[in-house]
Amino acid sequence: MAGIITYIKESFGELKNNVTWPTMAEAQSLTVLVAVFSIVFSLAIWGVDTVFSKVVGFYFNLIS
């Protein structure tokens, strides 16, 4: 149990002293970048899914 407590203390020390945290402006710009990328990527997946759905539907209507 003492090993776990030591690990947690050292982890917090590492976060306080050795990690370079981004500035608020950097964090906000990166958050916006991730949000925009997520929206664009989800729209691309939705588009591909829609096209495949239409193609599969057309195929099964054709053979029926």
Image (cartoon, rainbow, N blue to C red):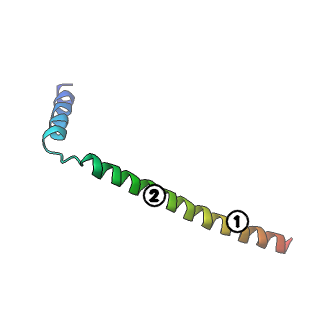
- Element marked by disc 1: helix
Report the front residue among 17 and 64: 17
Task: Determine whether 45 is above or below 25 in the image.
Answer: below
Q: Assign a secondary structure to mark 2.
A: helix
- Counting every numbered tag in the picture gives 2
Can you say which quadrant of the picture contains the N terminus?
top left
Q: Quadrant of residue 6?
A: top left
Spatial CA span between label 2 and label 1: 25 Å
Q: Quick one: label 2 or label 1, which is nearer the N terminus?
A: 2
- Residue 11's disc number: none
Q: Dots 2 and 1: beta carbons under 8 Å?
A: no
Q: Position of residue 58 (x, y in %)?
A: 78, 71
Horizontal and vertical percent for residue 34?
A: 41, 55
Where is mark 2, residue-wise? 36
32 or 18: which is nearer to us? Answer: 32
Residue behind mark 1 = 53
Residue at left offset 83%, top offset 74%: 62
For image coordinates 44% across by 53% down, the residue present is 35
Disc 2 marks a residue whose amino acid type is: Val
* Mark 2 closeness class: few <14, some 14–19, many ≥20 residues within 10 Å: few
Q: Position of residue 22 (x, y in %)?
A: 24, 49
Depth check, mark 2 against mark 1: the one in front is: 2
Mark 1, residues whose alpha carbon is within 10 Å: few (<14), some, or many (≥20)?
Answer: few
> Residue 2's image quarter?
top left
Q: Residue 37 appears at what percent x and percent y?
A: 45, 60
| Viewport quadrant of the C terminus | bottom right
